[in-house]
Image (cartoon, rainbow, N blue to C red):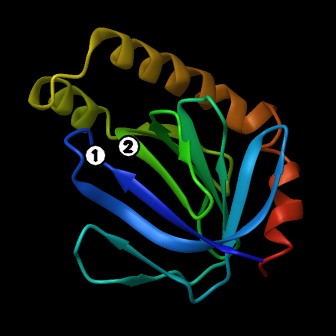
């Protein structure tokens, strides 16, 4: 399996979260990457963070989100970032994080996070109207989809099994 660099940036191109993950496959939902427990990630140039749980990440083609699926014991089961569509190369996936997040906890609770940051960055970075609209629509769709639609129900578990 090959390693792929995952690079999230903010709208001003500043480096955000980044890490190396293993390529697990691609299906109708997008490209799947995974990392075992003990893998590391980093936000910008802050200290490295060690992930206590295995996790897989979905990078859809031509959609405005990415999604992380965490193994237990992490209380956050699904963490979806609203992003620009992912740009793919052989060994790098990159996208712009648009602040909004849809989070599904293991107890089934679903909520939107960072709406304040989204509002602030619309002004600070001058998000175009179409970016704001698509980000909001994607966020609203995800709030329901993470509890009712694949790949958020069972599909991701087949990929998670590959990195446990």
**Can you tell which mark lies on residue 99?**
none
Q: Are marks 1 and 2 in contact (CB under 8 Å)?
A: yes
Q: Nearer the viewer, residue 11 or 160?
A: 11
- Secondary structure under tag 1 reads loop
Q: Position of residue 93 (x, y in %)?
A: 53, 54
Image quarter where the N terminus lies is: bottom right
Left or right: 99 with respect to 69?
left
Left or right: 131 with respect to 29?
left
Q: Position of residue 106 (x, y in %)?
A: 67, 58
- Residue at 54% of width from left, 23% of height from top? 138
- Secondary structure under tag 2 reads strand
Residue furthest out toward the front: 90
Left or right: 21 with respect to 150?
left
Tag 1: Cα neighbours inside 10 Å, few (<14), some, or many (≥20)? some
- Residue 116, quarter of picture: top left
- Residue 161, quarter of picture: bottom right
Q: Position of residue 45 (x, y in %)?
A: 22, 74
- Residue at 69% of width from left, 63% of height from top? 33
- Residue at 69% of width from left, 69% of height from top? 34
**Can you tell which mark lies on residue 97?**
2
Residue furthest out toward the bottom: 38
Left or right: 145 with respect to 148?
left
Distance between mark 1 and mark 2 Cα atoms: 5 Å
- Residue at 67% of width from left, 54% of height from top? 107
Tag 2: Cα neighbours inside 10 Å, few (<14), some, or many (≥20)? many
Q: Is residue 122 above or below residue 72?
A: above
Of the numbered discs 1 and 2, the one sitting upstream in the chain is 1
Q: Nearer the viewer, residue 60 or 139?
A: 60
Residue at numbered disc 1: 10
Q: Position of residue 85 (x, y in %)?
A: 52, 34
Q: Is residue 97 above or below residue 130?
A: below
Image quarter where the C terminus lies is: bottom right
């Amino acid at each position: 399996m090959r390693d792929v660099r995952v690079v999230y940036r903010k709208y001003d191109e500043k480096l955000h979260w980044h890490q190396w993950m293993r390529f697990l496959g691609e299906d109708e939902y997008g490209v799947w990457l995974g990392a075992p427990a003990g893998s590391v990630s980093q936000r910008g140039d802050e200290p490295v963070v060690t992930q206590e749980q295995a996790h897989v990440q979905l990078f859809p083609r031509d959609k405005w989100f990415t999604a992380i699926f965490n193994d237990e014991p992490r209380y956050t089961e699904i963490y979806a970032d609203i992003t620009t569509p992912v740009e793919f190369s052989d060994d790098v996936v990159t996208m712009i994080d648009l602040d909004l997040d849809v989070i599904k906890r293991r107890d089934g609770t679903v909520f939107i996070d960072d709406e304040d940051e989204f509002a602030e960055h619309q002004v600070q970075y001058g998000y175009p109207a179409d970016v704001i609209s698509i980000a909001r629509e994607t966020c609203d769709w995800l709030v329901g989809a993470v509890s009712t639609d694949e790949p958020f129900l069972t599909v991701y578990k087949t990929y998670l099994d590959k990195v446990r």
